[in-house]
Image (cartoon, rainbow, N blue to C red):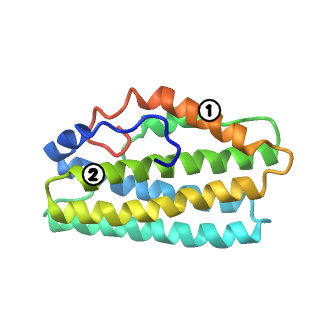
Amino acid sequence: MLGLKLATDPRWVSLVESNIDEILTDHAWCEQKAASNAISIIVLYPEHADMVTSLLALAQEELTHFNMVHERILARNTVLGRERKDPYVNELYSFLIKGEGRHKALIDRLLFSALIEARSCERFRVLSENIKDPSLAKFYRDLMESEAGHYTVFLGFARQYAEEIDVEKRWKEWLDYEAGIIANYGKKETIHG
């Protein structure tokens, strides 16, 4: 699915179900970080008006998702916990091209963002198909459909702005790199953990 090379083991959902409060807090912060990432790209590359327009809408949607997750947290009579670090995203970040110019940095940042959205979408699918709580299953099904759209936004702009960059080759490199690190995850009750 989504070009990912390694699927999430559905047994990961058992870990999630053992601590729903933790997954919801982690998930909320993932949505906030996704909104911040889109805004960061806008700040760095404001000259791409079509991308700015799309990423503004995406950031707003991510904040809506943050609110939806927060409402679920409150409905469970708990509170949003502190922000969590995301080792998966940090490992992906280390693969970003640095020091080779602004244009290459944009393309790589878009591919990095697409990959995170693709993995989140895949995790939401696994949750929607395996979690025992029907309300959470529907919630994650709806989010999965939205995240699939986000993945295509980032990948589409990478392709649109690629110019002399072989974006398909670089996307394959990202997918291969992600496959090498994701095998170490799926052992914690977090979205990427």
Foreground disc of the pair 2, 1: 2
Count of numbered badges drawn on the protein: 2
Along the viewing direction, whichever of 154 and 10 lies nearer the viewer: 10
Mark 1: few, some, or many residues within 10 Å (few <14, many ≥20)?
Answer: some
- Say if 43 sits above or below 174 in the image: below
Q: In which quarter of the image is residue 63?
A: bottom left
- Callout 2: helix, strand or loop? helix
- Of residues 33 and 110, the one nearer the viewer is 110
Depth check, front residue: 185 or 148: 148
Residue at image mark 1: 95
Residue 149 visible (yes or no): yes
Image: 184 above or below 74: above
The label on residue 74 is none
Which amino acid, by three-letter code, is at mark 1? Phe
**Is residue 97 depicted above or below 139 in this figure?**
above
Q: Are marks 2 and 1 in contact (CB under 8 Å)?
A: no
Local packing at callout 2 (Cα closer than 10 Å; few below 14, some 14-19, many 20+) is many
- The answer to whether residue 81 shows anywhere in this view is no
Task: Residue at 35%, 38% (x, y): give it.
Answer: 8
User: Which circle's residue, 2 or 1, is located before the other in the chain?
Assistant: 1
Please give the residue where the numbered disc 2 appears in the rendered image. Answer: 127
Quadrant showing the C terminus: top left
Q: Residue 60, percent across and down? A: 50, 71
Residue 48 appears in which quarter of the rendering? bottom right
Residue 119 coordinates in the image, percent (x, y): 45, 46
Secondary structure beneath disc 1? loop
Frontmost residue, 176 versus 82? 176
Question: Is 66 drawn above or below residue 151 in the view shown?
Answer: below
Give, as a three-letter code, the residue at label 2. Answer: Leu
Question: x%, y% of residue 156?
Answer: 66, 58
Real-space Cα distance between discs 2 and 1?
Answer: 27 Å
- Residue 100 x/y as whole percent: 81, 36
